[in-house]
Amino acid sequence: MSFKTFQVNLYHFLSNVRPLLTTLVIFWVLASLGLGWLVNSLLILFGLILLAPVVLFFGFRWWLQRNLVSDRCPVCEYELTGLNNTQLQCPNCGEQLMVKQGNFQRFTPEGTIDVSAVEVQAQALED
């Protein structure tokens, strides 16, 4: 191994390690000047920046698990998904639906009475 090859390898090594060494020297100087609180606050801020997306992801999944409802349309029995306490329209039959307490209900304006028809079998009366 020649001296020139050693110099080239050393130069590449130092160019890769330089940012790490610079950061280490800056933290060392700040800590020696009594600015350890600044270093600690920067480390805490960096930790929060790394931890926040994880907490948000699991928080959003928990909220979605509690509020996402999958049920069948009461009119046409088409299976669909919606958020709790919201209105939506069935993509199959076009009926306006309201999601309440984990079930889909037909959305009716205030004062409307919703009736279900029942088929009655006709019987002949005998004398």
Image: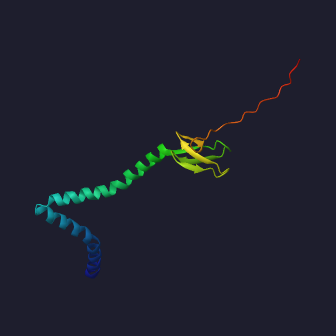
Q: Name the one closer to the observer, 9 or 93.
A: 93
Q: Is residue 110 left or right of residue 16?
A: right
How far from the left and from the top, in percent, is residue 122?
82, 28
Q: Quadrant of residue 124?
A: top right
Q: Name the one closer to the observer, 121 or 59.
A: 121
The residue at the far right in this view is 127
Q: Residue at x 41, y 52 (%)?
A: 57
The colour scheme applied to this rendered structure is: rainbow
Q: Residue at x 58, y 42 (%)?
A: 104
Q: Quadrant of residue 70?
A: top right
Q: Residue at x 20, y 57 (%)?
A: 40
The residue at the far top in this view is 127
Q: Residue at x 58, y 45 (%)?
A: 109
How far from the left and from the top, in percent, is residue 55?
37, 51
How far from the left and from the top, in percent, is residue 62?
44, 45
Quadrant of the snapshot with the N terminus: bottom left
How far from the left and from the top, in percent, is residue 118?
72, 33
Q: Name the one closer to the observer, 75 or 3.
A: 75
Q: Name the one closer to the observer, 39 or 118.
A: 118
The residue at the far left in this view is 33
Vertical position of residue 43 compared to residue 18: above or below: above
Quadrant of the snapshot with the C terminus: top right
The residue at the far bottom in this view is 4
Q: How many marks?
A: 0
